[in-house]
Amino acid sequence: MTSTGTTTGTTTGTTTGIRLHAPAPGWSVTADVVVVGSGVAGLTTALRCDAAGLRTVVVTKARLDDGSTRWAQGGIAAALGEGDTPEQHLDDTLVAGAGLCDEDAVRILVTEGPDAVRRLIETGAHFDESEEGDLELTREGGHHRRRIAHAGGDATGAEISRALVEAVRARGLRTVENALVLDLLTDADGRTAGVTLHVMGEGQHDGVGAVHAPAVVLATGGMGQVFSATTNPSVSTGDGVALALRAGAEVSDLEFVQFHPTVLFLGPDAEGQQPLVSEAVRGEGAHLVDAQGERFMVGQHELAELAPRDIVAKGITRRMQEQDAEHMYLDARHFGAHMWEHRFPTILAACRAHGIDPVTEPVPVAPAAHYASGGVRTDSRGRTTVPGLYACGEVACTGVHGANRLASNSLLEGLVYAERIAADIADRPEEDRPEEDRPEENRPEENHGADRPEENRLHARVPSPAPVDRPEKPAHPLLAAEARFAIQRIMTDGAGVLRSAGSLETAADGLQRLHSDARDALDENGKTAEPGVDTWEATNLLCVARVLVAAARLREETRGCHWREDRGERDDATWRRHIVVRLNPDRTLAVHTTDTPDFPPTLPRALDSVRSVRAGETPTTGPQEQ
């Protein structure tokens, strides 16, 4: 697990040389682009790259249709309705982002969004329509207009996923399913050369292998599984952010984890993925009430239950504290059976499966981890600080969401920035491409249909990855699988909806103990957990958890979905800026803040501007080992 090379050119430092302990790749395929992830961001990128003639491979952790996108209930936001404009959408997004949105990034989102949605419809996605044949738009928290397009009532994500998966299969794109991405491959100059991955189960490939490509697009989704209760599927373990950190890329805004206000409460000990009760239910007129039936959000914000999610989550949590209650209620009995059955059939079925009938009784709800507003830092074309590495969707931090994502902007961001990434890859000038010619014998079998002649396809010259030594003794420890549950408890208790200096210090100490125990076992007897999906996921979760906690300790204010009980006020003079983190080769964190809410280009910056953060100390005083 030695270094795969030293970065040069447009990077901000050197590759870390830190890699997950894993067997050497036993198989490989070659492509122009490898897209990691099969949600709206990943499949849109793949389809656009394929349409540009780039040989594209899609790698996904589960099945093609099993990512976070299919769980999206509410819809996709865009200025598509009569009287609505991109400027109004921009204004609502900036307000929700609590002063930390990159305005240029938001303007790209809202101006390119409507046409991106129309292209999605042309791809085959069917959205609900009115009797007149117009899109049936609804409203969600933070939006002053009805601009949310939905499908199947509350099954928007499932419909988008269906349409994109069908398009991918119709075009014959090469896919590798049930594959956990491990690490980035780089060439001797530090440029992207592909990824290593592990295929779980039977198929064309199994075990650890590699996809060699000069462009890698991370679309791996979120990291909600770092908390005990989340709306994210079990595969959302922060693998893309962890890979990017090990590759030397910058991440930003990881402290801003959005907790969805209304998640079906299944009991105080419920863990893992929890059923979401879409914001669209409140958009159609449902009320938040306490056990006495009082609407406690009225008077807290001009939009009451439709305030931005951070405000509603805080309102619910405050009321729970005041009344020593484990949950609040969402009351939509006035909808009647017909509306529930036709507008929200998925939510109705989930509630009834857990013994709750929303038609006749209020639904118990509580906040749960939902969406990471931060991630791998990119520019307006999805480029990270590592040449050839792109990021898109929830794994990325484009600056669009700021300190709190506006409802239903995530699917739109995936669409818009996926198209921009594909255009950038297709337009890469020849001098930016690696010099090595692709070995003819390494070209994968074509699977693109007889109507796509080989001579019309583009083929980037694929770099040769630098050799990777695999010593008998691992250079870095893997965590045991059971550490996943310890991480989740630590994060829920110390870095959840409510945070303070004390709770974050306790969380940092707990995470440090997990790392130290694994490090000590490796140093003392050369032993570490066996390589495997469970241990790789636990190790990734620890990596992203420690960065999240370090950033949350450093940001001594309350802003958006980062709520510090001990720093209850927003501090624009000091903190209207982003925290940017990079992992050093010695496993310390290089931490700096931007000068403004706008992101700087993904270009080199002086290393002397970097501050380090040490575990167990005030975050401004020294390096933190990872």
Image: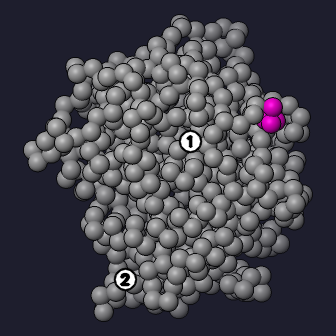
- The percent coordinates of residue 451 (x first, y second) are 11, 48
Helix, strand or loop at mark 2: loop
| Extent of the magenta region | 608-613
Quadrant of res 548: top right
Front-most of 441 and 380? 380
> Which residue is drawn at the image coordinates 90% and 57% (left, top)?
566
Pointer 1 residue: 384
Tell me the number on the disc at residue 135: 2
Report how far apart the C-alphas of labels 2 and 1 lie in the structure. 36 Å
Which quadrant would residue 321 be assigned to in this image?
bottom right
Picture coordinates of residue 53, whole percent (x, y): 26, 45
2 or 1: tag closer to the N-terminus: 2
Above or below 59: residue 184: above
Q: Does residue 454 appear in the picture of this structure? A: yes
Q: Position of residue 257 (x, y in %)?
A: 66, 55
Three-letter residue code for mark 1: Thr
Please identify the quarter of the rendering in which residue 404 is found.
bottom right
> Callout 2: few (<14), some (14-19), or many (20+) C-alpha neighbours within 10 Å?
some
Query: Is residue 449 at least partly visible in the picture?
Result: no
Please give left or right for residue 221 compared with residue 12 in the image.
left
Residue drawn where x is 82% and y is 46% of the image = 553
Which labelled disc corresponds to residue 176?
none
Taking 20 as reference, is 251 above or below it?
Answer: below
Amino acid carrying label 2: it is Leu
In the image shown, does 594 or 321 lie closer to the viewer? Answer: 594
- Is residue 212 or residue 316 the one in the foreground? 212
Q: Is residue 278 left or right of residue 428?
A: right
